[in-house]
Amino acid sequence: MKTFKLFKFWIFLIAISAQAQEVKNQSEIIRNNVSKGEYRIVADLYKSHSGVMEITDVQFDKNQPNDHFEIVLKQYPNHATESTRNETSQYFPDNIAFPVTYVNSVYEGNKKLQEKVGYVVREGRSIGRDRIVFINDYMFFLQKWESKDDYEIRFVLKAPKVANETTESEPKKKKGFLKSMKSKMGASKSIGSVDIDKIKAEVLQPYLDEATKRQETYYKQWVAKPENAKTKKYIDDKRAMMDKAMKQYNDDIFNSPEYQRMLAYQKWLKNNVNVTVVNKKGSTIWVGSSKEAFITHEIPSGRQSTQTCTTDLYYYYSDAKGSPGHKFYSADSNCGSTVTIN
């Protein structure tokens, strides 16, 4: 059994690392290997998921040179909750010339301005800790990214076009051992048999190491060309302009009369969320927030109690559940004040 599992894993390594001999950037791999559809999880760091992720769109990122892409991904398309099921994330190249990963990023700031001048991948933000990498027909979903040597593989996923070995238009051939293993690797039951640490050490890390070296060399050559240096300056200027626009937008909001009134109200509300109830009835009463006593606060004669001012208040002559109450205060009518019950 152990020999079978080792051979099965060896077959998986051959299938996933077939492209590693020729290091390509992610946009090249995406152009040739990636399509929309469901990518099935074949390995999970926590061995808790056996579902799919769905690439809903693969489109040229027209705001970047070199025919890079924007990848739109649904992480949990089969989730029971509709909001989670429909939630999408956008991924953009991590480098203008030779992307090694695609970075999770978001649209933010002035949307109309972005539509006119183009999207800018934000820098120095924690959103970039989720990344995706494509190798051959597999997608690696990475999390907690700090550098090429410091990250986690959350999922390894198999491309939709590898899910079936034949199509309806093709004659079905008898599966060889290799095809049988590849087919089984796509099934959810194979999750526990794929060693993520081994995948990282023997497949993904070598790619990241070699691709990063290529990125550094290629980028120096790329940016040395005047037309590319001009493109880089355009993108840098666009990012600076967007930062300035976002700061100005925030400043305009923070300095607006509406915002200042809101701040003043919040400050007042923080210090005035209660009402003081003074009992001058000559006997003990109980105070609560329903017509019939349920949860009450005892106030002896001549004493006082602090109550929340955001609900209606009633007083009772008994703390027995169901005791009829007498309304003496309406919600939000006199926060910060003192109410006397005579």
Image (cartoon, rainbow, N blue to C red):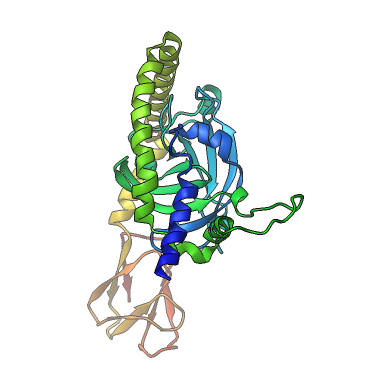
Q: Residue 172: horizontal and vertical position, in percent?
A: 72, 56
Answer left or right for 184 relative to 127.
right
**Of all residues shown, which one is farthest toward the top?**
226
Q: Is residue 104 above or below residue 325?
A: above
Residue that appears at 68% across and 53% down: 166
Give the tally of numbered discs: 0
Whether residue 48 is visible to the viewer of this picture, yes or no, is no
Q: Residue 187: horizontal and vertical position, in percent?
A: 55, 62
Whether residue 321 is visible to the viewer of this picture, yes or no, is yes
Front-most of 332 and 200? Answer: 200
Residue 324: quadrant of the picture:
bottom left
Front-most of 114 and 230? Answer: 230
**Of all residues shown, which one is farthest toward the right?**
169
Residue that appears at 34% across and 67% down: 308
Front-most of 57 and 126? Answer: 57
Front-most of 119 and 55? Answer: 55
Question: In the picture, which quadrant includes the N terminus?
Answer: bottom left
Question: In the picture, which quadrant includes the C terminus?
Answer: bottom left
Q: Is residue 183 above or below residue 261?
A: below
Residue that appears at 42% across and 67% down: 311
Q: Is residue 308 above or below residue 110?
A: below
Residue 310: quadrant of the picture:
bottom left
**Of all residues shown, which one is farthest toward the left?**
303
Q: Residue 159: horizontal and vertical position, in percent?
A: 56, 49
Answer left or right for 161 relative to 11.
right
Q: Residue 341: horizontal and vertical position, in percent?
A: 33, 75
